Every structure is written in C-alpha cells, then in structure tokens.
Image: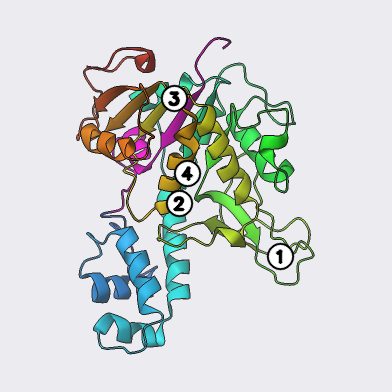
Amino acid sequence: MKGDPRTVLFAGAGFTCCLTDGAAPLMPGFFKGLSKEHFPRLSSFLANAHGSIETANLQDVICSLEQLRDIPYRPTAAARFLGDIQANPLLEDITRFTIDRLSVLDWSDNNWVSHLLWNADQNWTVITTNYDTLAEQILSNIAGIKHCGLDATCFHCRMRNLLSTYRYCDLESRNRTPWRGSLLKLHGSIAWRQCASERCRLKDKRIITNSRCEMGDKIYCEHCCSPTIPVIFHPTPVKKYSTHPDIKAMWEAAGLALEEAEELIIFGFSFPQSDSVIRSLFRESLKTGTLKKIHIFDLDPPAIHAKIACLLPTGLNIKYHLWRTPRDFSVPTWWKPKIVTAEAR
C-alpha cells in the first residue's frame, strides 16, 4: 500500500515452530522420532557421537561431522565409526530425514502467526532461513495476488523469478525492485532441486523450482532428465554457497531489502555466533540508517534485542517493540492482527 513503511520480516526456526503449534523441530531435539529402521547408519552415529537420538542438536551433529571427517587420527568411538561410514552419506541421511520431517508440517488459518503473513503487502520482503514451505503456502494464498510471469505479485512467484531471471545480474543496478513483495530463502528449501548428473549440459547447476512447491525424489532435470538432489545448506559455520550460483540472488536481494527497510520484524531467529554470514549481512546492510522500528517476536525478546543492537551502527533512533511468545504456543494475550503497527507492551 502506498505510504506504508518498507518492511522486512526475518523468520527463523522459532517462526515455523509457532506457526505449527510446536510441531516443527528446533535445533535441539531435531532428530526426535528418527526411525532406526529407515536410517540405521544415522541412528548409529547419533548414538555413538551424541549419546541420544532424542536430544541431539542438529547444528552440533553437522559440526561434528565436518570436524571428524578430516582428523589425522581416530581415538574416539565416533571417529572410529566414521572409518567405515564417511560424512557425506550421513549428510545425505540428514537431508532425507529433514525433508521427511518438514514435508508433513501443516498450518491452520486459525493460528495467530499465519495472520502476520496475511498482512504482508508489496512493501514487505519476507526473508527466512527455514527449509520448509509453509511461508510460501500462506503468502501464495493472499487474496488478490497475481501468479506467474514477470509481473507477478505473489511472493513465491517473485522468488522464483529472482532465482531464474536475475541469477547473473546485479540487482542494485536495475530500475525495478524485485525484492519487494518477494520471499527470500537464504539456506535453501525442501522444494528446491538440482541436477545430480555431472554430464548435464546445464553445467552451472541451476536451482529447479516449481509453482506448487512440490518435493520428493521424483523430480527430474528438464535438460537431461536425470534425477535431482535437494538444495539445502546445513547449519554449519562454513556453508558452500558457491556450489549454487542461483543463491546469490537471494542474498543480494536480502541485503538490498534490509538497506531500505524502515521497519524490521525478527521472528524466532537467535543470531548465533556461528552464523557470521547472516550477522555480517545485517551489520553491513543496516548502515544506511533508514530503519526506524524493530519488532522482536521470541521466547526471550530482550536477549535478541541485545544481539541485534550489537549489529547496528551507533546513533540510530530506533524504536523497539518486544513481544514474548508463549512457550505452550498458545495465542499471546497481547496479540492482534495489526500488532506491527501497535505499541509494544
């Protein structure tokens, strides 16, 4: 809407957890429900290296795989386990389990978090580190939007345009602002695929998306008809973004959206020290000084306030609104659909 502030919603794992009434996993306990029958080697590794499948932290598991794979000696049970089973197959297992776990998630029209997305307009940019497709499902069903084509107003369709049309373009040099009214996924998606064939003529490995957010193994490369593999960046300190050139458009658009943002909504993202890339993205992009208001939705809003304040330049006159989300995922007593325009309590 004309006159509305340019708004960025940045959604982390806590966003999907609230949206699904706690059904979505967080980093701790991510592997709860892992089937030993369907994932025998991953189950064995978690038991050897992390003691418990139920309490294993996804980020800790990924980091341990990265470290144990290349050590010059094998003194521990977990390291000896990797003598026979290397890290790459285990990462493939984690990817498969992630897709299985997240593809069954669902949301309800009655959930209070979904109403936050219903308020999104063409001055909003929604940025997420989540792999699931719930945000795009909601944003694709906003009344009155136009799907497909370069003039689409659907957040998901505009994301697909960014991945395909702007992959080798400098977004900042263009007169249009394709990041506005778009969904930006920084760590990949369970619905994104890439050709697995080394012989494919599409040597730059384009990310394959579709209008319905379909997922699964039965998606084939349109150029060589080979099977495809998921495009997911696991939560490690060192993510290999260079293996997927298309992802550059997501990050460049996110930076430009943050640079012009007047209002920032942070929902369920903790700004971990291990994710220096995102911390740097915020630190560099928010130097413009256009930001006037920050809303923080979290279990511990003051802690996130302290973290984001460290990333901002000094001297900015920013008004903070701190919203504590209930641990039982019930509707907060302070909630109302237009909360981002209301005063914090």
Q: Is residue 14 left or right of residue 234?
A: left
Mark 1: give few (<14), some (14-19) or many (20+) Cα within 10 Å. some
Gap in Å between the C-alphas at discs 1 and 3?
46 Å
Instruction: State which tag comes first along the sequence, 1 or 4.
Output: 1
User: What's the residue at 43%, 80% (across, down)?
Assistant: 86
Q: Which residues are magenta?
A: 1-27
Residue holding disc 2: 277
Residue 215 position within the rendered picture, expressed as x and y whole percent measured from the top left: 56, 50
Residue 6 position within the rendered picture, expressed as x and y whole percent measured from the top left: 52, 21
Gap in Å between the C-alphas at discs 4 and 3?
15 Å
Gap in Å between the C-alphas at discs 1 and 4?
35 Å
Residue holding disc 1: 226
Mark 3: give few (<14), some (14-19) or many (20+) Cα within 10 Å. many
On screen, residue 26 above or below 243? above
Residue holding disc 3: 291
Mark 4: give few (<14), some (14-19) or many (20+) Cα within 10 Å. some
Mark 2: give few (<14), some (14-19) or many (20+) Cα within 10 Å. few
Residue 22 in the magenta stretch? The answer is: yes
Instruction: State which tag comes first along the sequence, 1 or 3.
Output: 1
Gap in Å between the C-alphas at discs 2 and 1?
33 Å
Secondary structure state at the residue bearing disc 1? loop
What amino acid type should be assigned to the residue bearing mark 3? Leu
